[in-house]
Amino acid sequence: MSSRPLPPPGFVAARIRRGRYIFLKPPDREPLALVCAGYEVCEPDFFVDRPSFQWHAVEFLESGSWDVRQEERWVSAAAGTIVVYGPNQAGGIRAAGRGPHGKYSAELDPTYEDLWHEKGQIGKTVVTLCHHLRAHSQAPD
């Protein structure tokens, strides 16, 4: 039986009511290696603000009202919003209002980042990942 990697220290943000995650060891030489995916139900005071992140993160805000950081300012975001951040790119998400606040996430290995950005692949990949996560994940009760 093979063991799955554990999340790095500090990976899972504080103020998570319930979460379900899968952590994978990325295969070699894959331009879009998935290293983690999950679903979180966040507390009403959930807040994460990272100056950078070791992977490319794609977050699909499934339910609730949110604020997301775009460069130096915070803007309102409704359910259905997709948030992307990663290496050398700040990202922040905070719950707004009473909730419930649910979100799906996928983290991708940035090793072959140039391939990911070629010919608009980033947008196509983000949309495909979010549809796949929503269609094939069952949120925890």
Image (tube, rainbow, N blue to C red):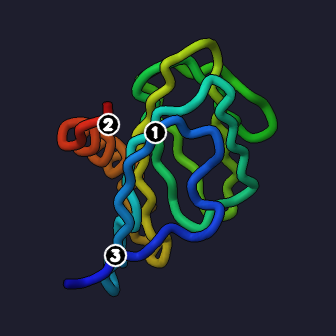
Of mark 1 and mark 2, the one earlier in the sequence is 1
Image position of 126 with respect to 117: above or below: above
Give the quarter of the image for residue 75: top right
Give the quarter of the image for residue 67: top right
Q: Position of residue 48 (x, y in %)?
A: 68, 43
Secondary structure of residue under mark 3: loop
Q: Nearer the viewer, residue 118 or 39?
A: 39
Say which residue label 3 marks: 4
Q: How far apart are marks 1 and 3 (CA)?
A: 20 Å
Q: Position of residue 16 (x, y in %)?
A: 56, 39
Residue 104 makes an appearance in the image: yes
Residue type for callout 1: Arg
Left/right placement of residue 17 relative to residue 32 reads right
Quadrant for the N terminus, please: bottom left
Q: How far apart are marks 1 and 2 (CA)?
A: 7 Å
The residue shown at (62%, 23%) is 44
Residue 124 is labelled as none
Say which residue label 1 marks: 18
Q: Where is residue 47 in the image (x, y as percent from the top left)?
A: 69, 36
Say which residue label 2 marks: 140
Image position of 141 with respect to 5: above or below: above
Residue type for callout 2: Pro
Q: Where is residue 101 in the image (x, y as percent from the top left)?
A: 50, 25
Q: Distance between the residues labelled 3 and 2?
A: 20 Å
Secondary structure of residue under mark 2: loop
Left/right placement of residue 45 relative to residue 85 reads right
Q: Which of 134 and 19 is in front in this view?
A: 19
Q: Are marks 1 and 2 in contact (CB under 8 Å)?
A: yes
Q: Do the residues labelled 1 and 3 touch (CB within 8 Å)?
A: no
The residue shown at (68%, 27%) is 45
**Dot 3 crowding, Cα within 10 Å, few <14, some 14–19, many 20+:** few
